[in-house]
Image (cartoon, rainbow, N blue to C red):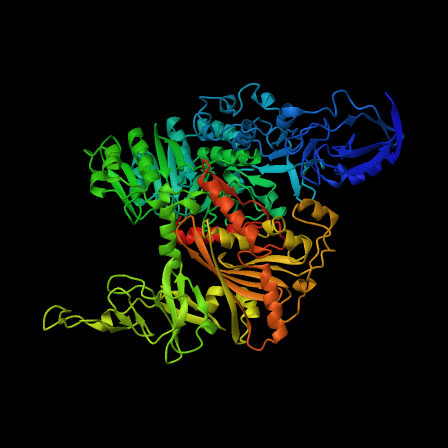
Amino acid sequence: MSFQLTNVPAAQVHGAGAMAVEVDGLRLALFSLDGEIFATGNICTHAFALLTDGHVENGCVECPLHQGLFDIRTGKAQGTPVTKDIATYAVKIDEGIVWVDTQPRAGAGEAGGRAAALAAPADFRRLVIVGAGQAGAEAARRARAEGFAGTITMLGDEPHPPYERPPLSKDLLLGKTTLADAHVFDAGEAEALKLELRLSTPVASIDRDKQAVVLGDGETLAYDMLVLATGAEARRIDLPGAETVTLHYLRDAKDSEALGKALRAAESVVVIGGGFIGLELASAARALGKSATVIEAQDRLLQRLLPPEPAEFLAWVAEQNDVALRLGAGVARVGPEGVTLTDGTTVAADCIVVGIGARPRDDLARAAGLETAATGGIVVNGLNRSSDPAIYAVGDVAVLRDSVTGAEARMESWQNANLSAARAGGAIAGKPQIGTDVPWFWSDLFGGTLQIVGAPAADQTCVRRDGEAPVFFCLDADNRVAACIDFGDAEALRAARQMIEAGQPVDRAALADPDTNLFQIEDDDMKMLPIEKRFAWPAAGLDRVPDWAYTNKEIYDREVERIFHGKTWNYVGLEAEVPEAGDFVRSYVGPTPVVMVRDHDGGINVFENRCSHRAAEFCRELRGNTEEFVCPYHQWSYDLKGNLAGVPFRRGVNGEGGMGPDFRPENHGVKKLFVTQRNGAVFASFSDAVEPLEEYLGEEMLTDFDAVFNGKKLTVLGHYRHTLMGNWKLYPENLKDPYHATLLHTFLVTFGLLVAGNKSAMIVDPSGRHSTMASAKSDGAAVSDENKAEMRAYRDGLTLSDPRMMDFIPEFDSPWSVTMQVVWPGLIVQREMNTLGVRQIVPNGPNEFTMIWTMFGYEDDTEEMTRHRLRQGNLMGPAGFLGLEDNEAIKFVQDGMLNSTGGEHLVVLDPKVPTGTSTTLISEAAIRAMYKHWRQEMGL
């Protein structure tokens, strides 16, 4: 070996993370990884670039020029565009100074070929799981199964390895099994999973800034991803006299062991709480031959979970097994004599058990500032990711929030522990779970098993009596099966699961009839799944958008019905386009042709461009002036307000033919839309229930809208019109996607209009439907070398032959030089420095739309300002400096969906902002917000 002195202190490398050095004529890179120093060649093998200017993550360095990856430890190229490895060199530290062997290690720096391109990158990520229960164990198991190769450390409070909790109130409590029988991992499995299992290791706090957990003894443990599987704890009750007796609770193995001993020694057992845990404990007491009483404060058992009919049947089952039920009873005090109720009666007991529910153990999360639910628990999305994208929560502590409705649900079940762990484990490994499962729960009671599939909260209950015990079907208001509660009929449960998944209305009488084959109900009555069942959104939530949202004709037709013809304001034109009576413009609301016309009273009317006789489009010109509209087919005519004005041969010829005596012209005018205006912009709606435009836009959106439409009279400067081969939603998306703007448009980034490093924002209204992409122009000098390296579209040295193109004349009450505002569903208000325009989206089907551009200025503009606006108009339009790339990109996206095997769009940038306004350009939060609103409107 030939070690050479670098004269670089090791501490300096550790502090910087990466340093460039030159030793014996070699350009080397020194990297600090996990307390060690590694040396590699510093020149990318694909194109000349210094790797020390790149990004280091997960043990790899990314070339700053073309994002090629190299493993720092081995030098291996990790895939295209790099296929040749970089050289690596041995390092030693002598008296705190770094020495490097200038002879490359054997094999380093040689062409990797296909083997190097396909080599799996080393995984140096650290996954820490807090909570060594079933959910935590399953998360580790799934992460490994899906390919996570980093380290996994599991921290548990208890001295026991992970175990399942259902046996605690059943066979384990009765002494029929041991705790070992409930262990999640088989012998040797934790070792095979390369899992560091640290038991009896409580966690004191989470330091999110440093991404570390602080243990009870003060030790810190760093993580890249953290899973909180802290579970729940038994709710405690404060009762007079509690200090004189032992109140038993059941949550962990220690509780189960103590309660099992107490039950066997007791004669009279009283259970406070009539939920599932209380009934299971009463069942266990009866199995041991003890007397059992259940005290429940509500008027029936399981009032918050079960409808009355199954709850009453469950009470009957308990009473048949000699369990005394005291319903609607409060507890006044406890003592050696037993439990005294609020009515003064005392129930004798030498063993008192409390089962009044559980409280999620979210203290660590709350202290760390994670979002938690008002009722307790850590709020997570469809991937079980918390408000911190590096932290997941699974099992009893997790509260799943619906990404569209905002509804929250926390489930305590064996199934939920597994499913939530599977979602988190798959997401951590980069393979999110697809699809959802119908909720399922079971409870062993009095020698039988109660099972519930679905969500029991429903409008009505249908009882089917064809066995030893009835089956209870919960139906919603549309007679669709929402849940099934069963006491032993496995066939009924399977049929119910199918009916829940199908989501079709059923015949209630047939469902209750014991002679009806439940599986044939689906065959006979469920010929067609409802649209919301056939088009199920990915389980990941708003992070993914399925292809069918852009390509399916049925979805498109629903958009026309629910969005364009629904409670929306649709831009149809500018007042300046119809200044005089009789002036008209042919326009659209969605794909529906309409006419905007000014009448002789000065009002502006909008009505469908469809003759009420035979549906012909009666207005064929794009714009003009007229006294009436005459259908070219049969010459029916309409006035400027859309009223039927004339019907040729209405009374026939020579007393024969024509219309009957009941024909009333006033009943056959064209369909008129509701119209509103603001400062020169005209909107129309098919709905009379749409909110006022000011409320529709909201205060923040009005600010940007009024900066352009400020009350000055407008002057139309010209129009563009072109058709794009893509779905119409891709255009609003494009204007809610500042990420692409910093990468796709050479003109935009090179001349500083919208570029990483500028003052900028992606502003979204609270509904998620409207947005403004905003930026303050820079001269390009503000772009850092690091950001330039990320933007392939950036071109240093590019200049304009006419620099006036980039002049910005301040004239707006706004901090922004560029705003692109989307007014849902089909308007873009453009202010690109001093060029002004509106873009109207006209969908022609799921795979095509037309853009109508109208460029304008103000009536009081000087001739030079008008020339300046026209000059800057070359920035935009179908062939503008900024428009052409968008048009191509949208077509590429649609082609990719139509010509591939199908899939989903990944919109995960900026996960700390789930939906809404973001102050970074590297964000897709506005797109997620749009689809949250879209799904609400579409009922999907």
The image position of residue 93, as x and y in percent, is 85, 28
Question: Based on the displayed image, in which of its 4 quarters is residue 111 positioned?
Answer: top right
Work out whether residue 247 or residue 387 is closer to the camera in this orientation and state it. 387
**Looking at the picture, how far across and down is residue 209, in whole percent?**
68, 45
Relative horizontal placement of residue 649, taking residue 118 as reference (left or right): left
Quadrant assignment, res 295: top left
Compared to residue 202, the image places residue 930 above or below, namely: below
Look at the picture and state if 116 lies above or below 424: above
Question: How many numbered marks does the figure carry?
Answer: 0
Q: Residue at x 27, y 46 (%)?
A: 479
Tell me what residue is drawn at x 34 percent, y 27 percent: 447
Q: Nearer the viewer, residue 661 or 773?
A: 661
Q: Nearer the viewer, residue 346 or 483?
A: 483
Along the viewing direction, whichever of 647 and 23 lies nearer the viewer: 647
The picture quadrant where one finds residue 148 is top right
Q: Position of residue 712 (x, y in %)?
A: 54, 76
Work out which residue is located at the far bottom of the displayed protein and give it.
Answer: 601
Residue at image x 48%, y 48%?
403
| Most distant residue in the left direction | 655
Query: Above or below — where is 158 with respect to 300?
Result: above
- Position of 147 with respect to 801 (left or right) is left
Which x, y percent locates residue 519? 26, 33
Considering every residue shown, the one lying at the far top of the view is 187
Decide if residue 559 is on the left or right side of residue 149.
left
**Is 799 on the left or on the right of 902, as rendered?**
right
Query: Is residue 426 at least partly visible in the picture?
Result: yes
- Mark yes or no: residue 410 visible: no
Check the picture and name the quadrant holding the N terminus.
top right
